[in-house]
Image: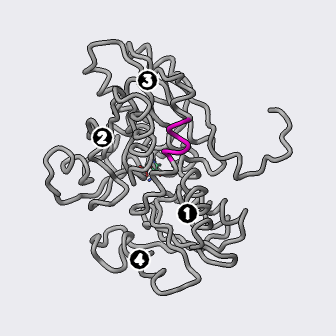
Amino acid sequence: MIFNSNLNLLKAIGNTPCVKLENISKLTNHEVWAKLEFMNPGGSIKDRIAMYMVEKAEKEGKLKPGDTIIENSSGNTAMGLAIVCRQKGYKLKIVIRNTTSKEKIKMLEIMGVDVIKVEASLPPDHPDSYNNFASKLAANDPNVFYIDQHNNLDNNEAHYMSTGPEIWQQMNGRIDYFVAGVGTGGTCTGAGRYLKEKNPEIQVIGVDPVGSIFYDYFKTGKIVESSRYLIEGLGDEFLIKTAQLEMLDDMIQVTDKQAIENTFLLVAQEGILSGGSSGANIYGVLNLAKRLKEPSVICTVICDSGYKYLSTVYNDDWLTANSMI
Ligand code: PMP
């Protein structure tokens, strides 16, 4: 890398490589590319929104020196925020499900984050649930800013402003399909919206775990009852503002087992050690690839690093206990 006197940790967020998955391309007879988001300083795609949403709030006067930031996160937004808060001097409180991988929780604690674990099995409308507790903590405190990545459209805008343009440039405009799992939906719809503006022919395909409500809502307009699933970072139990499903061309549903199998396929075929949501994306790519008649160019996202899941996806005891092997 060339010397750059302005480079600091926040400026190292984004501009991740977009690489051709050589062996998966051969396997599918299509060109498959992947944006390596585990190469962000916090090890995931969520560094982008952490920085963008904090800086937007600063510009809008919603954050002032000494404030505390609060957020509910499956761990990656939390890690991005931990970095941004260390760099900028804010305090950080994170509400996280007690089923989140030990590694993610430990890393946040090492970063000095106030980590509040909530019982994952609480119904979504319970005041102490993952979905409600952070906003409850933030209510009526002028020294607290609630990021609210699930309803704050600055999340989608972060990807519209960075992930989308980077993919367009790195692919040199040669892209037919963009495939991405929907957690908040920021990545898929934010980057997807940018790509579609550049070329309306590009199809944007969301991936949703079985147990989440997004897929059924997209296909039928009906809200089904959610059920527990293992893949961290994808899906939800109710509709959220940032999941702008109406702009997707299609959605693909993935089981935990299919996502995990394809996480291992990504290791075996490409030497990429990712989290389970990236395996879900690879399942989405393979599922799509089978249906395509013309040779196509497909781009997806490797959302985070497998280092965050050594105690879960890469642990035989966990896989056995959850009937994954
Ligand atoms: N994978 C992982 C591991 C994540 O943490 C997230 C964020 N929830 C996603 C995928 C989905 O990204 P988005 O929230 O932008 O839909």
For residue 247, the mark is none
Q: Is residue 65 above or below residue 147?
A: below
> Is 35 in front, or is 231?
35
Q: Which residue is mark 1?
A: 105
Q: Which residue is mark 3?
A: 175
Sort mark 4 into few (<14), some (14-19) or many (20+) by Cα contacts within 10 Å: some
> Is 142 in front, or is 233?
142
Amino acid type, callout 4: Phe
Q: Earlier in the sequence, mark 2 or mark 1?
A: 1
Amino acid type, callout 3: Ile
Residue 155: give x, y in percent of width and height. Answer: 47, 55
Amino acid type, callout 1: Ile
* Quarter occupied by the C terminus: top left
User: What whole-number distance in Å separates the C-alpha atoms at marks 2 and 4?
Assistant: 30 Å
Q: Is residue 42 above or below residue 95?
A: above
Q: Is residue 141 located in the magenta-colored stretch of the structure?
A: no
For residue 248, the mark is 2
- Indicate the secondary structure of the residue bearing disc 1: helix
Q: Earlier in the sequence, mark 3 or mark 1?
A: 1
Name which residue lies at 70% across and 52% down.
10
Nearer the viewer's eye, disc 2 or disc 4? 2
Amino acid type, callout 2: Leu
User: What whole-number distance in Å separates the C-alpha atoms at marks 3 and 1?
Assistant: 37 Å
- Indicate the secondary structure of the residue bearing disc 4: helix
* Mark 4 residue CB less than 8 A from any atom of ligand 1: no
- Indicate the secondary structure of the residue bearing disc 2: loop
- Indicate the secondary structure of the residue bearing disc 3: loop
Q: Is residue 34 above or below residue 289?
A: below
